[in-house]
Image (spheres, helix red, strand yellow):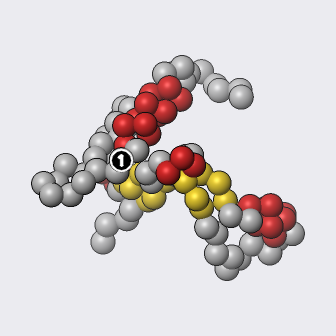
Amino acid sequence: MLTLFIVQSYGTFLVGPEHAAALRAGEGAGRVVQLRAVAELPFIIYAPDRLQPGPVVTTGWGIDGVHEHPQLEELRARQRERTKNLPGVDKKRLD
């Protein structure tokens, strides 16, 4: 069995305040959460068991005949901007 995660760092939760209130009230079990991508950026799909040490570089499918998401390059640019000033493993991030 292969475990996959789907990530969207640039998204908003539909009815997010309602979900947050339910979680605070201890009533979050069984809720269905919907996420909408900001600026139609693609979701990232990865297998955590296959991650290698070091920075993760988002790549396309690389399959002949399968078109890449039209916003893939914008997503890559945003990721580079977000990660270029991250602290090393010897430092703590305070923000």
Q: Amino acid at mark 1?
A: Pro
Please tell me whether residue 83 is drawn above or below residue 1 in the rendered image.
above
Residue 20 falls left or right of residue 50 = right
**Residue most toward the bottom?**
30
User: In the picture provided, is 5 more to the left or to the right than 63?
Assistant: right
- Which of the pair 71/19 is nearer the observer? 71
Q: How many marks?
A: 1
Q: Is residue 31 above or below residue 44?
A: below
- Residue 90 in sight here: no
In this rendered view, identify the residue nearer to me: 50 or 90. Answer: 50
Residue at image coords 50%, 51%: 40
* 64 displayed left or right of 21: left
Quadrant position of the N terminus in the picture: bottom left
The x, y position of residue 19, in whole percent, is: 76, 66
Label 1 secondary element: loop
Mark 1 neighbour density, 10 Å: few (under 14) some (14–19) many (20 or more):
few
